């Protein structure tokens, strides 16, 4: 899901982070866990193709077609599986003004993929016995509507009923009028809490960045550290990630790509590379690169930083959108497990297919939707149609409102 500023353009594909609404914004009634797991048979390792030059040519053509149709300035892709080879490519430009080409070693903002790091941090603390998934959020943060009944599990699973702060018109105006300003978690929550709750806890699925801001505060309270410090030290480093960062402000290590968004005060396309991602904080502020996200795809999907029982809880998914289940800060789309991200100017997709142990990472430098679909989803769909035709990564297109 994403972190779009308003309820515009997010969709299941928006399981990432964008400056506007940061999320899907669609409520889905509860469904039995078993019913949301993709019905198609698992992909056996032998069914995943060798990534031969011929397959690479097919993938090149598919990626370039999406780029052309959706007018994507630049994209990088990594696809691999043990014994099957790898496909690593970068197409297009990192800077439209200079024509500087995009490269596979560039840093990118990863938006709502930050949610997978924040939830991992929370689950680590659960493993340490410092909290329980069924604890009410009111035990840790005061002033939350329904805080005595909304649990940490429901926050991580997007089933709290709390209004998404990034869908608030006042927030949109504040952010787009000065996108380089910092926001505090308390300011973000205030935009949410002035709205009534949308539904009773656990009644429905509704993607809300508010949930992750609260979980970030829980991590800080339980660990005694700033969220950025905890994630960088206790999640990023143990995962073996070398170029992944939870920033403290607008810092963006070089080399990085510029980012292009229409989530602006005027609706005109602007370069958002130096915008401050603090408005996304625990829901979408992080930075990474292609190699690190390839590593993270397996770490988060297999739970190497968690106890097996805790990882099993994370992967229990309920229906979010047709063909898509959402667990604790993670989704399952036709067997592909992971998350996507969208922040003004950037989108990402990082997923893992368990049986062949395949990883797919897509990083691109725009969040501008094409015919109501997130660009990252279009790339995921085009690529998986070739390599796993029975398990195509697809998220329903959502309407995009003007902004």
Image (spheres, rainbow, N blue to C red):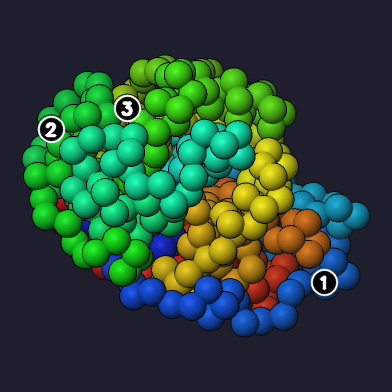
Q: Secondary structure at mark 1?
A: loop
Q: Please tell me how crowded label 3 is: few (under 14), some (14-19), or many (20+) other residues with Cα within 10 Å.
A: many
Q: Earlier in the sequence, mark 2 or mark 3?
A: 2
Observer-nearest of 127 and 10: 127
Q: Residues at badges 1 and 2 in contact (C-beta under 8 Å)?
A: no
* Figure check: 279 above or below 193: above
Q: Residue at x 48, y 62 (%)?
A: 326
Q: Earlier in the sequence, mark 1 or mark 2?
A: 1
Q: How far is the residue under mark 1 from the one under mark 3?
A: 41 Å
Q: How far is the residue under mark 2 from the one under mark 3?
A: 13 Å
Horizontal placement of 391 versus 374: left or right? right
* Figure check: 337 above or below 122: below
Horizontal placement of 108 versus 24: left or right? right
* Figure check: 37 above or below 105: below
> Which residue, given by chain and number where applicable, does mark 2 sit on?
174
Q: Residue 69's quadrant in the figure?
A: bottom left
Residue 131 visible within the image: yes
Residue 75 spot, x, y in % from top left: 54, 45
Q: Please tell me how crowded label 1 is: few (under 14), some (14-19), or many (20+) other residues with Cα within 10 Å.
A: few
Residue 44 tag number: 1
Observer-nearest of 202 and 342: 202
Q: Earlier in the sequence, mark 1 or mark 3?
A: 1
Q: Residue at x 62, y 82 (%)?
A: 39
Observer-nearest of 241 and 275: 241
Horizontal placement of 390 versus 287: left or right? right
Q: If the image is split into quadrants, where does the N terminus sit?
A: bottom left
Residue 385 visible within the image: no
Q: Residue at x 86, y 57 (%)?
A: 84
């Amino acid at each position: 899901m994403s972190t779009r500023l308003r309820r515009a353009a997010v969709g299941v594909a928006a399981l990432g982070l964008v400056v506007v609404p940061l999320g899907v914004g669609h409520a889905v009634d509860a469904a039995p866990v078993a019913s949301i797991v993709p019905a198609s048979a698992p992909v056996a390792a032998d069914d995943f193709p060798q990534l031969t030059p011929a397959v690479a040519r097919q993938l090149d053509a598919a990626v370039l077609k999406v780029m052309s149709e959706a007018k994507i300035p630049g994209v990088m892709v990594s696809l691999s599986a043990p014994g099957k080879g790898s496909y690593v490519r970068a197409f297009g430009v990192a800077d439209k003004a200079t024509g500087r080409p995009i490269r596979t070693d560039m840093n990118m903002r990863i938006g709502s993929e930050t949610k997978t790091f924040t939830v991992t941090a929370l689950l680590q603390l659960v493993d340490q016995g410092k909290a329980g998934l069924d604890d009410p959020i009111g035990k840790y943060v005061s002033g939350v509507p329904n805080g005595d009944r909304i649990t940490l599990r429901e926050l991580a699973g997007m089933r709290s009923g709390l209004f998404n702060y990034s869908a608030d018109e006042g927030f949109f105006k504040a952010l787009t009028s000065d996108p380089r300003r910092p926001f505090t978690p308390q300011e973000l929550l205030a935009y949410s809490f002035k709205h009534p709750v949308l539904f009773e806890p656990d009644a429905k699925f509704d993607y809300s960045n508010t949930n992750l801001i609260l979980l970030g505060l829980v991590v800080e309270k339980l660990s005694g550290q700033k969220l950025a410090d905890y994630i960088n030290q206790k999640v990023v480093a143990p995962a073996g990630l070398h170029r992944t960062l939870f920033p403290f402000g607008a810092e963006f290590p070089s080399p990085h790509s510029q980012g292009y968004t229409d989530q602006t005060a005027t609706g005109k396309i602007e370069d958002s590379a130096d915008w401050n991602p603090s408005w996304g904080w625990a829901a979408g502020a992080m930075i990474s690169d292609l190699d690190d996200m390839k590593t993270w795809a397996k770490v988060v999907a297999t739970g190497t930083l968690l106890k097996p029982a805790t990882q099993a809880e994370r992967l229990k998914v309920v229906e979010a959108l047709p063909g898509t289940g959402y667990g604790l800060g993670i989704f399952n789309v036709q067997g592909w497990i992971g998350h996507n991200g969208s922040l003004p100017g950037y989108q990402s997709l990082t997923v893992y297919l368990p049986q062949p142990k395949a990883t797919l990472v897509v990083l691109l430098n725009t969040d501008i939707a094409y015919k109501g679909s997130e660009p990252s989803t279009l790339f995921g769909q085009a690529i998986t149609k070739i390599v796993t035709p029975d398990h195509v990564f697809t998220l329903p297109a959502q309407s995009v409102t003007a902004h």
